[in-house]
Image (spheres, helix red, strand yellow):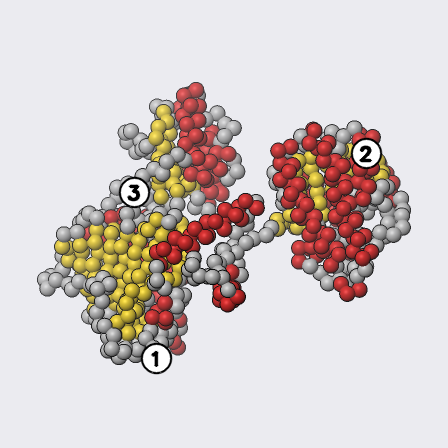
Amino acid sequence: MDQLRFDGRVAVVTGAGGGLGRAYALLLGSRGAKVVVNDLGGSRDGSGKSNFADAVVKEIKDKGGVAVADYNNVVEGEKIIQTALDNFGRIDILINNAGILRDKSFTKMSDQDWDLIHLVHLKGAYKTTHAAWEHFRKQKYGRVIMTSSNAGIFGNFGQANYSAAKMGLVGLTNTLAIEGSKYNIKVNTIVPTAASRLTEDILPPEMFEAMKPELIAPVVAYMCHESFPDSGAVIDSTLGYATKMHYVRGQGAILKKKPSDPVTIESVKEFWPEATNMKDSIHLEKIADTTINLVEKIQDFEERSKLDGDRESYWSSYKYDSKDLVLYALGIGASVENESDLKFLYESHENFAALPTYFILPGMAIESPLVANSMPPGKHADFTNILHGEQFIEFVGDLPGTEGDFKVRSYVVDTLDKGSSAVSIVNSEIYQNKQLVARTQQHIFVLGQGGFNGPRNSKQAVEVQPAPKRAPDAVVEQRTAEGQASLYRLSGDLNPLHIDPNVAAASGHPRPILHGMATLGFSARHVLAKFGGNDPANFKALKARFVKPVLPGQTLVTEMWLEGKRVLFQTKVKETGNTVIAGAYVDFKNVVSGQASSGPAATAAPSGALKSDALFAKIQEEVGKNKDLAKSIGGVFLYNITESGKTVKSWTLDLKTPAVHEGGPKSGKADTTLTVSDGDMVDIAAGTLSPQVAYMKGKLKISGNIMLAQKLGPLLKSNAKL
């Protein structure tokens, strides 16, 4: 790697007579920078003076560098900057490192203790930076480092003055990074932990020895270099380690139930756990982003309130990716032994897809209090007395893609009295990008809670359909694995009934039972393969009733009857003859009898202009200019560009002809098919995302001739010929 140098640059380092400042000055001086070594040479509390700066200057000069000493106080920062201008004619780098300590508990702290700390740390950094700022603006170049502390980030007993000043420097950094951006002035903060005059009798001797300033100096030097990409960053470093720190903001909560409700002290208390929940927290870069984020949340709240009306609803979020889909497919019996299952198990398969029953999971609303709240007076529901009785799902439009996130609205539509038990009918609506993509319905049996003179049936219920009284049109058998339940539970249903022998015995089972949803997943797979061409995009709806449990290791027998575009089915256990799923059906968009289809995956309609369109237009132009280079690769490449896991546009790079056009190959098949998201495609071309890393992380999926893709890669970078 080429050495990063500072030839022609002038650096000012305050507090450079020892510790961190000395390490910064020596390193910059050794890499070609001309250095102003500033230091009053005082003790830890700022009193006294010495000639420490001269000693550091001598060290730099003895090693062939250029440096001058400066003994001005940072509160007179303009004098320090003038030293740089008088001796070297310019200023490029400013490291605000000077500092003192006046530690006392808050009750004993005097105004002088407070004022002196702020003068040196905060005002000193302001004065030196302010004096250099106009020079940076005129030359359109500058690098500034502020020095904060973990005491500022986290607080520390006895350092109220110091921590306040150090946190103030972070705020100063944030604003100057904004103001300096158009002038190529980058301002960043270092949070160092190192041995210095300030810590020599505070740290244990062995720790003091290990925390060498020389381990932090390379981090700060890189932050000062012209190639450093960031501005406004807070970097924590010690012992040869570095990390970025920043604030994150939780998802928060609207502090009322409906837009028309007032916000009261009581409502604040009610929503406080949600308001302070840091799960799924985000980092916002600008003040404007916080306003946009808040407006979006209020709009979301108002839209949800319109949907809810007077009904109690439970809203939840659900995220998934290719790993979740593969784990689910394994949990419901998909196997590489069946070649047609590979597209459900291999994220780089050109037709990789989700099994449709996976999308029942977002609507399960396991944490929802809805069922408990729906019980009549004197009745109760909890995890000890509820059973999943029936399940329905219907897709609205296309099947969701292979990664994404949902907002899910769940609500109770009816509560039935079945005599000994109550039944709560729970509907869920699954939204992606504010568009409804699926509806589900669960019938939750609440054992022992009937007898409240409620209705026995509901017009809101999606009814099961009895199996015909004729021989099945198709039958599929598949044995479940002994560990099937322990695998399926990783898709989210962690009920110990499915893995803990003691819980199973207490519930009256000889051993842990298989999840009903796993049994349903097996059966739906069988139906999809037999009558849906094994194409998930062909799947429209499903309804089923759970009758009896299955023990892992038992063999499932799925019996199917075809009636139009509906396939009725029931599932039995071969070893016992028991029916375990009844009254079930799958509706297809089109019936495709037989085994799995090997045709191409369905492609979603383009969503308009993509970021990668300009890239492919440029490739098209360059291929026209460099036909011989294109022919030297000699392959046909199909790029499937995705958004939210769905293919939204395809491009063919025919480097045999050569030609580049939107859509698939005009004749024959592609030698190599590459599937990548719009944003990742641009990042790969720009060189900010390595193709190898993208491939290993599943962001870039390649099928066909992978070696040919490696040959193509270097020529598609933004600075390459094609």
> Disc 2 or disc 1, which is closer to the eye?
1
Q: For this rendering, which residue is in front, 446 or 679?
A: 446
Q: State the quadrant of the N terminus.
A: top right
Q: Position of residue 378 (x, y in %)?
A: 34, 79
Which residue lies under the disc numbered 1?
A: 378
Q: Residues within 10 Å of mark 2 (few under 14, many from 20)?
A: some
Q: Secondary structure at mark 3?
A: loop
The kind of residue tagged 2 is Gln
Q: CA distance from mark 3 to mark 2?
A: 68 Å
SS state under label 1: loop
Q: Position of residue 56 (x, y in %)?
A: 84, 41
Determine whether, in the image, residue 344 is placed left or right of residue 71: left
Q: Quadrant of residue 153?
A: bottom right
- Label 3 CA crowd tier, 10 Å (few <14, some 14–19, many 20+): some
User: Left of 29 or right of it: where is 518?
Assistant: left
Q: CA distance from mark 3 to mark 1?
A: 53 Å
In front: mark 3 or mark 2? 2
Counting from the top left corner in percent of width and height, residue 151 is at: 70, 56
Task: Say which amino acid is labelled 1.
Answer: Gly
Q: Residue at x 75, y 33 (%)?
A: 91
Q: Is 142 placed above or below 398 here?
A: above
Q: Earlier in the sequence, mark 3 or mark 1?
A: 1
The answer to whether mark 2 and mark 1 are in CB contact below 8 A is: no
Q: Which mark is residue 82?
A: 2
Q: Which secondary structure, mark 2?
A: helix
What residue is rendered at 33% in x and 59% in y? 428
Q: Is residue 488 visible?
A: no
Question: Tag 3: residue type?
Answer: Ala
Q: Position of residue 107 (x, y in %)?
A: 77, 65
Residue under circle 3?
601
Q: Quadrant of residue 144?
A: top right
